[in-house]
Amino acid sequence: MSLSPQWLDELRARVTLSGVISRTTRLTKAGHEFKACCPFHNEKSPSFTVNDLKGFYHCFGCGAHGDVIRWMTDQRGLSFMDAVKELASEAGMELPAMDPRAAQEAEKRDSLHDVMAAAQAWFAERLTSSEGDKARAYLVTRGFNQRTVERFGFGYAPEGRQSLKAALSQFPEAMLIEAGLRIAVEDKEPYDRFRGRLMLPIEDARGRVIAFGGRIIDAAKTDAPKYLNSPDTPLFDKGRTLYNLHRAGPACRQSGRIVVVEGYMDVIALAAAGIEDAVAPLGTALTERQLEMLWRLTENPVLCFDGDVAGQRAAMRAVTRALPLLRPAHSLKIVHLPPGLDPDDLIRRDGTAAMEAALAQPQDLLGLLWQHERDAVPLASPEDKAGLKARLMAQVDTIADRDIQALYRRELSERFSAFAFPPREQREWKPARPGQRGVPAPRRSDPAQTARLRKSAGSRDALGAAVLAGLIRYPAELARHADVLAHAELADPRYGALVDAVDSGESLESGHLRTILAARGLASPAPDDYAALRFGFLADDAPPEQAQADLAAAVSLLVERPALEAALAEATRRLERDMSDGAYAEQQRLLKRKLEFESRLRHMASARAGAEQAAPAKPMAE
């Protein structure tokens, strides 16, 4: 399609600029012009003017300037072509003819829009029926009133596998499948994708339904995913879509910010609390395209992440994705909520003011990068600190803009120097050595107790090293355990690096995983270490199926350990505060679990030792 300057001028002439702007901004007549408080920045006295005769708007405060098409792209957040199409429809103008293939694709998309609109109407109608009782009850538990339910278009998909097909019988089966509403399987009858779910429409920048998200209602269905989104279709590309953009775009012009949260239910919870300028990606980390969409709205989008390990990892994925794209005046701000809370939890517990306070104090991108890399591994030796600097500079090297890269390099180098080479008077005071005047000699410890403690600590360290070695030796198992490892409180940053490799679609091969660790300045377990670790799944002659089962058991132990130790520590603190029978019983129960855990660990670590004593040694292989 080719839009000539003459055609665009005709479009501008047929549309009244003040009429379009007045839909979202209150205008006051002032002679031949209109005035208003600028929608692009906060002000108390009007400096924004609209001139229909000249066909442009202008703000004398912030310099915003443009015609009706620019208004649609900047204030509404539409793409240029979407803005032109909407204005042309309003003006009754036909778009210039496209080539036959493009015309056919456009016709197909228009037809699919009809399908999605019909599906949305049916889902909304089912929510109000007796079938939607459980879905309505769930919405009440979330605190969503009727206005929020109607505004965001909640609906319900019944349980039947053929219910939607019967309701939308006016559309061919092929269109329902192409729209992502039905699933086609070989040699079987197609069936409805969404069944027994609370439904939520996903809309494009023009407010048209292009996909759906469904949340399961029946908690007993543990074999089904909690949330299910439409697949990519001719209408829906999840990497190019931000949920709620058509509502948040205009709100962003008033607030001067755009907030990115992790899921669409977070967006709705914020909107219900009066925070209208929030969007969310759809089941993926932020893409380059989504970042560009955000930067069109504001120079510093605020990314808000849940206060858990997964939220921290999501923040770093966003940072590494954004670094190569940084350009002057465009960056990101990051907010971490209190541990264990998402936006809805925080608002319910502390109110909207607490959420606004968190959003008002974001961390800048550079600060998060420094904090994450500094805390990634213990920095006990000069080599560790040199590794920190290497990781920081490797991140800086990905920045394409040379000026920003140089400034990041200088700022991070200064922070590193202040951290690694503090002034002498600021260094940590070290206590006097035993034997000096006034310093008592240390108490002698029980040799047997010391040996038991060392053996226990050695087993714990060996477990972490063995699991890491096992995942590298059997890389296909990494995808199986990635979710569990991602949500575990593991101090070793190498697990985070391996899980990131799964999330980003990296090749899961032993050699490539070692390369990933090396690129982050992290060591890989060497094949020569396997014998010392003495876990059966690392043996050369271990049957693959048995090795994978033993590795899964070791992963379970590794994940269980931090939670058990934290619970035991809390129970011990409680017992010290409250010498009650209940506190004592809880501590003893956890101590018993800890002893059982250590017994299972010793058994796993010693199983290979017994096998090696009964069989001749074999050459070591990776």
Image (cartoon, grey):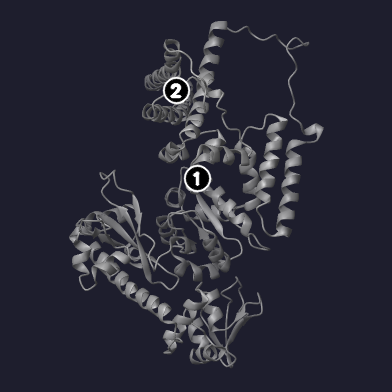
Q: Count all numbered tags in the image, as a single digit.
A: 2
Q: Quadrant of the rendered structure where residue 170 is?
A: bottom left
Count neighbours of disc 1 (C-alpha within 10 A) and say few if under 14, some if 14 to 19, many if 20 or more: few
As displayed, is residue 73 above or below residue 439?
Answer: below
- Horizontal side of 112 relative to 454 (left or right) equals left
Q: Residue at x 19, y 62 (%)?
A: 163
- Disc number for residue 10: none
> Which amino acid lies under the numbered mark 2 shown in the image of this protein?
Asp
Q: Nearer the viewer, residue 371 or 437?
A: 371
Name the element at disc 1. Answer: loop
The x, y position of residue 173, in whole percent, is 24, 67
As displayed, is residue 400 above or below residue 446?
Answer: below
The x, y position of residue 27, in whole percent, is 53, 83
Count neighbours of disc 2 (C-alpha within 10 A) and say few if under 14, some if 14 to 19, many if 20 or more: few
Q: Residue at x 45, y 81 (%)?
A: 85
As displayed, is residue 532 above or below residue 90?
Answer: above
- Horizontal side of 54 relative to 410 (left or right) equals left
Q: Nearer the viewer, residue 366 or 481?
A: 481
Residue assigned mark 1: 507
- Horizontal side of 477 relative to 357 (left or right) equals left
Q: Nearer the viewer, residue 402 or 584?
A: 402
Residue assigned mark 2: 578
Q: Are marks 2 and 1 in contact (CB under 8 Å)?
A: no
As displayed, is residue 440 above or below residue 256?
Answer: above
> Which amino acid lies under the numbered mark 1 shown in the image of this protein?
Ser
User: N-terminal of the two: label 2 or label 1?
Assistant: 1
Name the element at disc 2. Answer: loop
